[in-house]
Amino acid sequence: MHLAVSEKGLCYILWPNKQFKILEEWTTKYFSKSTLIYNQRKIEPYKAQIEEYFKGQRRVFDIPLDLKGTDFQISVWEALLNIPYGTTKTYSQVAAEIGRPKATRAVGGAIGANPVSIVVPCHRVIGKDGSLTGFGGGLEIKKKLLKLEGISSNKH
């Protein structure tokens, strides 16, 4: 995984199955006057918390975030931050929470655009019938993340 951090906080997590140019293009869009610089020391606190999560040692992240997206996307991502570890919600539940109950598909689009998955737990959103739906890291990773959190179902 590649992590991108701004002066304000974590702003992007690139999955290993994605090309680095995706991060470069995202950076150009949201930080047009910036350059990506490899700085292991700067990302260390972010990396440490993500590693603790994968080891089952962390349930809540307390790292600063720098979310970049539309107002609607950010409202969806903020709603995702309120889904507790070990629980799931449906797209329609998230839509209702942000006061847009008819915007289920748009919520799905915003979740798909989540630049900091895991920390903003889009993996905790499932289909109304309990089925797994898209995930940037792939459905197998989503299944593993849910299992790590103790969530299992025949539909997963």
Image (tube, rainbow, N blue to C red):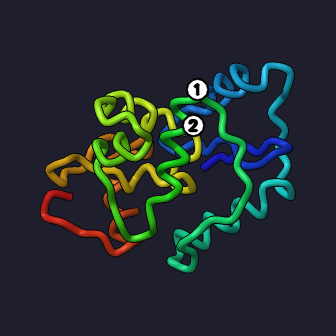
In this rendering, would 49 be left or right of 44?
left
Place of residue 94 in the rendered image (x, y in percent of width and height, measured from the top left):
37, 46
Q: Residues within 10 Å of mark 2 (few under 14, many from 20)?
A: some
Q: Is residue 28 above or below residue 75?
A: above
Q: Is residue 56 above or below residue 134?
A: below
> Can you see residue 141?
no
Place of residue 152 in the rendered image (x, y in percent of width and height, measured from the top left):
24, 69
In this rendering, would 73 be left or right of 106?
right
> SS of the residue at dot 2?
helix
In this rendering, would 132 be left or right of 146?
left
* Amino acid type indicated by mark 1: Thr
Image quadrant occupied by the C terminus: bottom left
Residue linked to disc 1: 70
Closer-to-camera residue (69/21):
69
Q: Which mark is residue 149?
A: none
Q: Check contact, mark 1 vs mark 2: CB within 8 A.
A: yes
Place of residue 91 in the rendered image (x, y in percent of width and height, measured from the top left):
31, 43
Query: Residue, x 57% and y 39% (percent of image)?
Result: 115
Q: Is residue 52 above or below residue 77?
A: below
| Direction bottom: furthest residue | 57
Query: Residue, x 40% and y 47% (percent of image)?
Result: 97
Query: Residue, x 38% and y 71% (percent of image)?
Result: 86
Q: How far is the residue under mark 1 from the one under mark 2?
A: 6 Å
* Amino acid type indicated by mark 2: Ile
Place of residue 42 in the rendered image (x, y in percent of width and height, measured from the top left):
85, 54
Closer-to-camera residue (55/66):
66
Picture quadrant where residue 103 is located: top left
Query: Residue, x 62% and y 33% (percent of image)?
Result: 20
Residue linked to disc 2: 74
